[in-house]
Amino acid sequence: MRRELPANSNCALRIALRVRGSARRRSLVECCCSSNRYVPLALTILGPVIVSILAYHLLMDPKGLPLAIIVTVLWFIAFFRYKQNFSGIFAARPA
């Protein structure tokens, strides 16, 4: 029987209480992403991967295109939520 931990529990406690391998990895990801600290990094890393997936399904295997489009839309929703973190990338610098 699986017990859920309270949302306000400590991150180290969450990791220590999960004993199975996959649950341990999942709780580590939960701790990193639940604090919203590394979400812009994850979006930056996932961007090119999603473009590759979308290009593959557009050009070679259209069966998976609906799912690729859904993933792309979800990425854009998350990106626009954290748009302020990317403002330095798109700002014009004086020459």
Image (cartoon, rainbow, N blue to C red):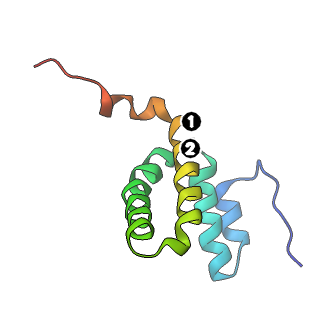
Q: Residue 83's x, y, as percent?
A: 47, 33
Residue highlighted by disc 2: 78
Q: Nearer the viewer, residue 70 or 87?
A: 70
Q: Residue 49's x, y, as percent?
A: 40, 62
Q: How many marks?
A: 2
Horizontal arrangement in the rendering, residue 39 relative to residue 92 (left or right): right
Q: Nearer the viewer, residue 33 or 67?
A: 67
Residue displayed at 31% across by 30% down: 90
* Inter-mark Cα distance, 1 to 2: 5 Å
Mark 1 vs 2: CB contact within 8 A: yes
Residue displayed at 89% across by 79% down: 1
Q: Residue furthest top?
A: 94
Q: Residue 38's x, y, as percent?
A: 49, 48
Quadrant of res 32? bottom right
Task: Assign a secondary structure to mark 1.
Answer: helix
Quadrant of res 31? bottom right
Residue displayed at 46% across by 53% down: 42
Horizontal arrangement in the rendering, residue 31 relative to residue 53 (left or right): right
Q: Residue furthest right?
A: 1
Residue displayed at 15% across by 17% down: 94
Horizontal arrangement in the rendering, residue 80 relative to residue 89 (left or right): right
Q: Which label sits on residue 49?
A: none
Q: Which amino acid, by three-letter code, is at mark 1?
A: Arg
Q: Quadrant of the C terminus?
A: top left
Q: Residue 67's x, y, as percent?
A: 59, 65
Q: Residues within 10 Å of mark 2 (few under 14, many from 20)?
A: some
Task: Assign a secondary structure to mark 2.
Answer: helix
Q: Which amino acid, by three-letter code, is at mark 2?
A: Ala
Quadrant of res 18? bottom right
Residue highlighted by disc 1: 81
Q: Nearer the viewer, residue 19 or 27?
A: 27
